[in-house]
Image (tube, rainbow, N blue to C red):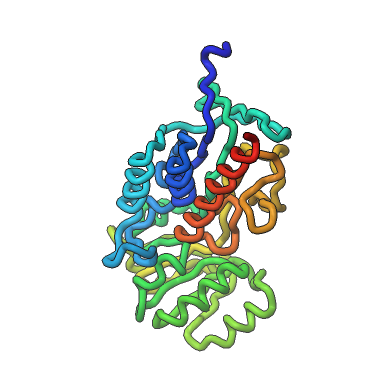
Amino acid sequence: MSENIEKIKCLIIGSGPAGYSAAIYAARADMKPIMYTGMQMGGQLTTTTEVDNYAGYKDGTDGTAMMNDFKHQAERFGTEVRFGMVTKVDLSDKVGGVHKVIVDETKHIEAETIIICTGATAKYLGLESEQRLIGGGVSACATCDGFFYKGQDVVVVGAGDTAAEEATYLANICNKVTLLVRKDYMRASKAMQHRVNKTENIEVLYNTEVDEVLGSNVVEGVRAINNLTKEKHDIAVTGIFIAIGHKPNSDLFKGVLDMDETGYLITKGKTTKTKLPGVFAAGDIQDKEYRQAITAAGTGCMAALDAERYLGALK
């Protein structure tokens, strides 16, 4: 059995900006990182058609092209990128201990360090029309994509602080924001509700849900339904922002690593260290505040540096 176990210095789980940035730094530190991409190579950014707020792309780019750039750079320094899913972990709680993982339920790996970059998945409504138009006017990130709707009318769906923040952010650049709230009240903090109510170009529709997103190739409107009266009406908009939360992709580490009540991994202070030695977390899996490509990349760099220092201290 031991002959079939691959032994490596650094395993990176996940292939978004955090994962690839960690790979670049780890490879340059001669840690010979192996990355398993997960089922969505490149992470959430590959669902974004345009990226205009990442430093260095002066004319903008699209998410898939950007992640390909990251991948090629990581590979240039010696990262081995593999398509596959980590399906089981057995993490050591000892300094210098070996962390065991199984990939695709068959391949066994022992790693001296692990960098977890599995991200968080935006929650969507589940409508066929919504899924079809993701990247064509349907977004889950106002700070990422709001710029493209400057001076236009948009819809935000949600009732919590995230929805309120996204609505007020968009109100600064859009002509009108319609906020659809499923119940007859908002869950957002009172301060955020006051901010929404004081913003003149935000209209809040309570007891209202999305029945259908209108448009063939791009969003042309939203068919809203009042869930009390069952009356429907169309709202002419060019963008719809779904702000009903994110689910961190941390199920694999439940009962193994510390996480908050919603499943985000907890790291120590300003580091990327988890509670287990040699195990680090970067990107959206441990950041529920910012969730930006550039902040994820920054923590990916930090995780590689933390891992390098951890290995250095063992010598």
Q: Is residue 5 above or below residue 75?
A: above
Residue 283: x, y in percent? 53, 52
Residue at horizontal 50%, vertical 52%? 301
Q: Between residue 59 and residue 243, name the one nearer to us.
A: 59
Residue 294: x, y in percent? 46, 60
Q: Is residue 273 above or below residue 212?
A: above
Residue 115: x, y in percent? 56, 42
- Of the 4 image quadrants, the one containing the N terminus is top right
Instruction: Please count the marks in the image.
Output: 0
Q: Between residue 2 and residue 249, name the one nearer to us.
A: 2
Residue at horizontal 68%, vertical 74%? 189
Q: Is residue 191 visible?
A: yes
Horizontal side, residue 164 vs residue 126: left or right: right
Horizontal side, residue 74 vs residue 113: left or right: left
Q: Between residue 245 and residue 224, name the one nearer to us.
A: 245
Q: Is residue 105 above or below residue 154?
A: above
Q: Examine the image and state in which quarter residue 228 appears.
A: bottom right
Horizontal side, residue 127 vs residue 269: left or right: left
- Of the 4 image quadrants, the one containing the C terminus is top right
Residue at horizontal 52%, vertical 35%? 11
Residue at horizontal 48%, vertical 46%? 22
Residue 15: x, y in percent? 45, 43
Q: Is residue 249 above or below residue 225?
A: above
Q: Between residue 20 and residue 86, name the one nearer to us.
A: 20
User: Residue placed farthest to the front in the image?
Assistant: 315
Q: Is residue 230 visible?
A: no
